[in-house]
Amino acid sequence: MAAANVAGKDGLLKKPQTAYWLWLGDNRERVVTVVGTNKVSEVAKKGGEMWKALSDADRKPYETKAKEQKDAYDKFLATEEGKKA
């Protein structure tokens, strides 16, 4: 597993995102439109409400991607290179 797969732009090890954060990244513009402001606290609050209201089928792709990222992260940490990170 290459470090590039779990490292950010600055080369530092990054923890994998949760399903919610992946969903919010894809849907932030829509949430901002619904809220009517770009204020972080209001977007996060409304995003949380919208995430909780999603069906299991709508959440599934984000949960799958989050699990893949977590598995890759854990696998990297188990390597010699990951233990140094």
Image (cartoon, rainbow, N blue to C red):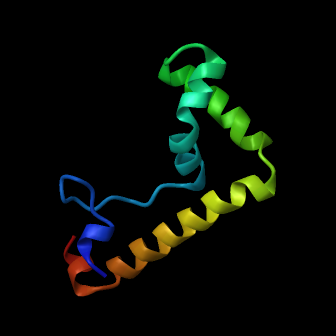
Does residue 44 show up? no
Vertical placement of residue 83 versus 42, above or below: below
Vertical placement of residue 66 versus 36, above or below: below
Residue shown at 25% from the left, 68% from the top: 4
Does residue 46 show up? yes
Residue shown at 77% from the left, 45% from the top: 54
Which of the 4 quarters of the picture holds residue 12? bottom left
Seen from the viewer's position, the closer of residues 18 and 37 is 37
Residue 49 lies left or right of residue 29; in this view the side is: right
Vertical placement of residue 34 versus 55, above or below: above
Residue 30 location, x and y as percent? 61, 29
Seen from the viewer's position, the closer of residues 29 and 3 is 29
Residue shown at 72% from the left, 33% from the top: 49
Residue 29 location, x and y as percent? 54, 29
Residue 10 location, x and y as percent? 18, 53
Count up the numbered dots: 0
Residue 46 lies left or right of residue 52; in this view the side is: left
Residue 49 lies left or right of residue 3; in this view the side is: right
Residue shown at 21% from the left, 80% from the top: 81
Query: Where is the C terminus found, in terms of image quarters?
Result: bottom left
Vertical placement of residue 38 versus 5, above or below: above
Query: Where is the N terminus found, in terms of image quarters?
Result: bottom left
